[in-house]
Each structure stands twice: as C-alpha cells, then as structure tokens.
Image (cartoon, rainbow, N blue to C red):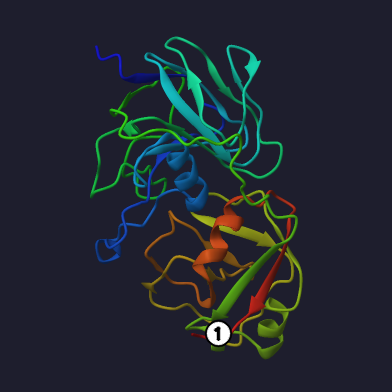
Amino acid sequence: MTDRALAVVRAGALTTVQDRGRPGHAHLGVPRSGALDAPAAALVNRLVGNCPGAAVLETTLTGCTLRPRCAVTVAVGGAPCPVTVDGRPVPWAAPVRVRAGAVLDVGSADSGVRSYVAVSGGVLVEPVLGSRSTDLLSGLGPPPLADGTVLLLGRPGGRHARVDVAPQPAPPAELVLRVTPGPRADWFTPEAVRAFTSRVYRVSSASNRIGLRVDGPALERARPGELPSEGTVLGAVQVPPDGMPVVFLADHPTTGGYPVIGVVRTPDLPAAAQAVPGTPVRFMAVRRR
C-alpha cells in the first residue's frame, strides 16, 4: 500500500476529479469535460507547485473532508469556503502544509458553487482518452467520490507558491453572458430573439455540469417541429420545448435536436460555473468575430 495517497472521509454533495478535460473527441461523441471553473483549477495547481494539467478535486456547494497518508501541500480556491486542518482554521486561496494523518476539511461554500482542491503531486486516477476528468454525461473517467475512496497521488514536481492569499474573482452577483447568434436563431420569433438578449433570467436549481439552466421568459418558436440531431459546442444555448434556455457546460452532449439560439463566449463560462441558483442572468448580444 503506497503512502502517496489521500482518503476521502466525507465526499460531500458532489466531488469529482477534474483536469483540463479531453477536447478533440466530439466526433466520437465524447464531451470535453474538465473543471467548470478552469481558471480556479489552474490557480490552485500553481499554488501547490503542480503542472497546469494536474488533476484536482472539484466540490459542489458542501465541500469535502480528506485525510492524506503522507505530508502534502494543498490549496483550496474557486468558491470561497472555510478550510480547517484538524479543526483549526487555515487560509483559503493559499498553500497549506498538511501532515500525514491530519484531517483537511473543505467547508460549504460561503458564496459560489464549486471549490477546487489541489494536492501537491496531483491526483493519480487512470486517464481515459488523455484525461483524468469525471464526465457525468458519458460516464468516462472515475466515478464521483464516495466516503472511503482512496486516491493515489503523484510525486511533487515543483515548489509551492510563496503567497499569503491569491486574488480570485468573486462569484457573480449578476451573471452577464456575451452571446453571438446561433445557427438556429431563425427558428424563433423576432420578439423571442429580442427577449433573449433584453430580459432578465435567473439561474435554476436544476443546473449541473452538463448545462446552466435558467428560469424566465419562455422563447417562442417561429417554426414547429424538431431538428435532426446536429453538432453542439461548449457554450451553445439550446432551447427545449418549454422555451427555457440551457447553456451547455463542460459535460454537454456533442449532438442535440433542439435549436441553438446563440453561443456564449468561452471566457464567460467560468463565472457561470459559480452562479448560485437565483442569480440574475443577462444574455448580452455581441457580434461574431
């Protein structure tokens, strides 16, 4: 039994292993996956001295509790949350040394949705198509963590950062998503297209890693019937029959039969990953580049 390992004491509501994902396999029906808030995941890796592609843990709302079997350096970022080691508070968004056998508790998010936990050496699960990411839609990668799971760790590759706290964007009080017209915008009435980019929506509690769902004005179609399935991309805004837009996130399907009214700019998606239910959402029309 290796001592370079990490035991999961409390898995929380949903904790998964994530890295930069597996892009380039959409033609095989495989989503990109990867950390929803990619800048936050990259930052905590830098804080502990990992390479940018090292696998981290992505928690959802309620955090997780971990017990390393060896001394490690950890950093927690993304959604702000309390962090303790053996019950004592330690800094969030900064490297922290944790001795072997100590209990690291990543608490519930104070704001935002997803926190990221990097451990020196990175999490070593078996890669699938070049990535260690959990994909909730296809089932590729490791399953979501459960209490008692033991994760192997890699060997530390670099020195941790020397910072007291690393600045990170606050979770959005209002989510503004820049959107370019989609390939099927003409499937909606002119009034619906105007409403899409002028009315306020709110993040739905039904959102997940597959898509950000919103509540608000239903978008009326100008055409009846359904499309044959066609390719979809990260950030595509698909509109099912209920008229409520769905923004595709990292675990989105690679094809779909509902019309895509627009596509959100990729740099805006990390903020979408941190938007709690009820957050106001505005879709801001921008020109195609």
Type of residue at label 1?
Ala
Q: Quadrant of the N terminus?
A: top left
Helix, strand, or loop for circle 1?
helix
Residue 199, compared with residue 190, is above or below; it is above
Residue named by callout 1: 185
Could you tell me residue 257's position as x and y percent? 44, 72
Question: Would residue 220 appear left or right of 183 to someone viewing this image?
Answer: right
Q: Residue furthest top?
A: 101
The residue lying toward the viewer, choosing from 63 and 196, is 63
Residue 48, compared with residue 40, is above or below; it is above
Residue at 60%, 82% (x, y): give it.
286
Question: Would residue 207 appear left or right of 43 to someone viewing this image?
Answer: right
Could you tell me residue 64's position as x and y percent? 54, 26
Residue 251 appears in which quarter of the rendering? bottom left
Residue at 35%, 49% (x, y): give it.
138
The residue lying toward the viewer, choosing from 29 and 79, is 79
Residue 241 appears in which quarter of the rendering? bottom right
Residue 37 in sight: no
Residue 63, compared with residue 6, is above or below; it is below
The residue lying toward the viewer, choosing from 150 and 248, is 150
Residue at 40%, 60% (x, y): give it.
253
Could you tell me residue 271's position as x and y percent? 60, 56
Question: Would residue 131 appear left or right of 229 to someone viewing this image?
Answer: left
The residue lying toward the viewer, choosing from 189 and 17, is 17
Residue 186 in sight: yes
Could you tell me residue 224's position as x and y percent? 55, 83
Residue 145, compared with residue 221, is above or below; it is above
Q: Residues within 10 Å of mark 1 (few under 14, many from 20)?
A: some
